[in-house]
Amino acid sequence: MRNISNSLHKTKLNDWLIMLVLAIILFPTNVFADHFKILGMNEGMPSSTVRAITQDKYGFIWFGTYSGLCRYDGHNFSVSKNITEDPTSIIANKVYSLSATEYGIWVGTEKGLDFYSYTSNRFNHCYYISDDLKTRSSLGNITNIVRQGHNLYITNNKGELFCHKKGFVFKKMNLNVPRSIGWFGLLPYKNNLLLAQASDGVYVLNPSTGKIISRFERKISSQGCNLFYDKKSHLLYIGFGLGFKTKVYHLTENDQIEEVEMQVPSNVNSIISYKGLLLFATDGQGM
């Protein structure tokens, strides 16, 4: 499986993704088919819906779909699905988030978080332990997986925020905020800090101390959001999807958050940087 074509090794994942998205938006179907290889169910994918994508150190491309986790070697797909009687199989088939590491892949699913090990070729189910160390629970439907330095943080669809403790154990973050708020967006920031979109505003967090560095109060009605931080301009962009305006904030030298009035696209699902430009992927308004 590791005999991958040279083109996969040479092509950066971001460039590959950007070309694919631009092609879908800019080219008619027949032109697209002539210039790009379409990977779908006819080519071996278990679902035509892809929610996450990453590339591992070997060059394999991994897709999180609604019907399992796929590994692509440049020619063929191998698919991992839940097998009820096999505790080493993936915990659920709907995969929403992925993060590749030196030793394996963190896999966020609708029923919890798994760690797939390259060496053992098995899925290890993760969990969190209550503060009194008496209860072991599932991490829920995983929405974000964020690595900051040597640390790992995740959120679920309930807005709960967890940090990696050791092995496959996580602990719930104890922050000095109202218990009723939910964490819906997470992004690495400088000096091991995190940028976060919560239900009541935007935060700069110090996860190692549990302290809030700064906060900009703004309640949101959408749980789905995408964060992008531009290091050059020190601007934080937050897109909330269909029907919502994109918010822009400036991070000062002492990490305070200021709202900025800018003309940016609405209905934004994803934001990335490409050759000095920002690309906004929108719902219904193209790129």
Image (spheres, rainbow, N blue to C red):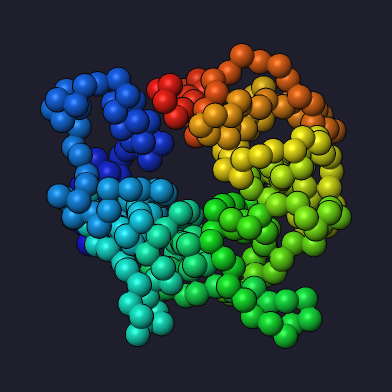
- Residue 111 coordinates in the image, percent (x, y): 49, 67
Relative to 103, 259 lies left or right: right
Single out the residue that lies furthest toward the top.
263
Asked if one can make out residue 255 in the rendered structure from this viewpoint, the answer is no
| Quadrant in the picture for the C terminus | top left
Relative to 182, 4 lies left or right: left
- Residue 61 coordinates in the image, percent (x, y): 33, 51
Residue occupying image coordinates x 47% and y 62%? 109
Q: Quadrant of residue 223?
A: top right
Relative to 282, 172 lies left or right: right
Name the residue nearer the viewer: 140 or 127: 140
Determine whether 7 is above or below 58 in the image.
above
- Residue 145 coordinates in the image, percent (x, y): 56, 54
Residue occupying image coordinates x 37% and y 75%? 89
Number of numbered markers: 0
| Quadrant in the picture for the N terminus | bottom left
Determine whether 287 is above or below 105 in the image.
above
Residue occupying image coordinates x 79% and y 50%? 206
